[in-house]
Image (spheres, helix red, strand yellow):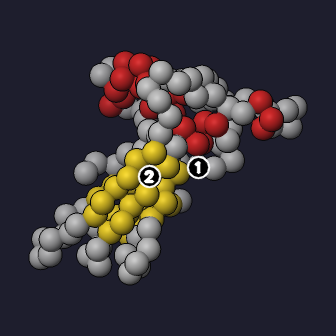
Amino acid sequence: MPPHSDYGLLTLLLQDEVQGLQIQYEGKWATVEPLPDSLVVNIGDHLEIFSNGKYRSLIHRVLVNPSKSRISIASLHSLPFNSVVQPSPKLINEDNPRRYMDTDFASFLDYSSSSESQRKSFLESRKLT
């Protein structure tokens, strides 16, 4: 799976013992070691926008293990499709200005089918600063 961030609020991931998930950290790819009986919690774009950048949606990817099959189950959590996502007014002030435009699912679909999406992530396209 190519590098991406998750569009929604949160993704809960249950994975087996086979490595495959990597996150981008300080410009490098880091493998997320599978832990038995645990969930990986990915912050999504909605939560980054709502928190005005306090919580960050990470770029991640999945690699295929050539010698072992990998099984994972993802549970994606988001708002209804017609909801508008915007930074919480309680997190915006003179010291912490608004960093993101309002967004909704229609904007995401329009952007995803545009040529700009090949150069910049949807979340990057919503940033004001």
Q: Is residue 65 left or right of residue 82?
A: left
Residue 64: x %, y % from top left: 19, 64
Q: Residues within 10 Å of mark 1 (few under 14, many from 20)?
A: some
Q: Which residue is mark 2?
A: 11
Taking the spot 37% from the left edge, 18% from the top edge, the residue there is 110
What label sits on residue 56 in the rendered view? 1
Tell me if residue 10 comes above or below residue 126 in the rendering. below
Q: Residue furthest left?
A: 67
Amino acid type at image mark 2:
Thr
Taking the spot 44% from the left edge, 26% from the top edge, the residue there is 81
Is disc 1 placed on a helix, strand or loop?
loop
Tell me if residue 113 comes above or below residue 72 in the rendering. above
Taking the spot 47% from the left edge, 21% from the top edge, the residue there is 82
Taking the spot 58% from the left edge, 49% from the top edge, the residue there is 56
Q: Quadrant of residue 35?
A: bottom left
Q: Could you tell me if residue 58 is visible in this image? A: no
